[in-house]
Image (cartoon, rainbow, N blue to C red):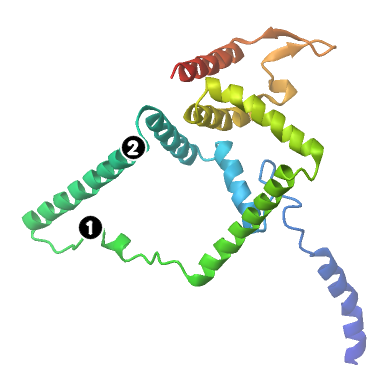
Amino acid sequence: MAEPSAATQSPSISSSSSGAEPSAPGGSGSPGACPALGTKSCSSSCAVHDLIFWRDVKKTGFVFGTTLIMLLSLAAFSVISVVSYLILALLSVTISFRIYKSVIQAVQKSEEGHPFKAYLDVDITLSSEAFHNYMNAAMVHINRALKLIIRLFLVEDLVDSLKLAVFMWLMTYVGAVFNGITLLILAELLVFSVPIVYEKYKDPSKTPWNRQKKGRITTWKPEMQQLLKHHLIVIMSLLVL
């Protein structure tokens, strides 16, 4: 008597199980979300994507400001001076805070202990497995770069080697005008400004200019003029450096 009831229930069970199939990761997500999810490389690429598109303003502002100050310092001072000043500034903050907490504890006669004890107890040792994983990932890129260098310099493909020669010849003129630090500063400004500007104005309904039927630019809005003027001033000031 139990068999017919089980048979009658099986279609509903199969239909519910077929209707509840999980969607593929990254196939349907919220609009604007990073499509590359599910693996470590994809998650890291999504983190970089969110960083340069200013998804978290505080995080991106901290990274952008810190790296820009570092590059500007390296443009004005030597690497040894910049590293020394950074270490001195960090030690000044930690030592001052340590002395301040010690005085407060002595006055209040409390036994809170070391102010950085929570950070001193953190286990930061790198396991051998994690070290081997990082080394294996690095070796993949190193081997790929070595194969590319050998292929280009031993002229496996004449066209690719000629492209490299022309590119290096053009870079000699770039090196005569800019130095490496200036190029890095310009690259950082472009990386942190161009993607967000493009994302803001890529929608035709939000573009700061009006286009005719032929697609020619006719009028520019004042905010776009101010944006281009600001970028031009920054680039010219860096060229003077």
State the residue in front, 20 or 2. Answer: 20
Q: Is residue 142 above or below residue 192?
A: below
User: Label 2 vs label 1: CA separation?
Assistant: 28 Å
Q: Residue at x 43, y 38 (%)?
A: 62
Instruction: Indicate which disc, 2 or 1, sits on the residue closer to the N terminus.
Output: 2
Disc marking residue 131 = none
The reply to whether discs 2 and 1 touch (Cβ–Cβ < 8 Å) is no
Is residue 24 left or right of 76 when viewed as pictured?
right
Q: Secondary structure at mark 1?
A: loop
**Is disc 2 placed on a helix, strand or loop?**
helix
Q: Given the image, on which type of amino acid does mark 2 rest?
A: Val
Is residue 181 or residue 143 the one in the foreground?
143
- The image quadrant that residue 33 belongs to is top right
Query: In the image, which disc is placed on residue 82?
Result: 2
Q: Quadrant of residue 193?
A: top right
**Residue 39 vertical position relative to residue 16 in the rendered view, above or below:** above
* Amino acid type assigned to the residue bearing label 1 in the image: Pro
**Farthest residue, direction top:** 218
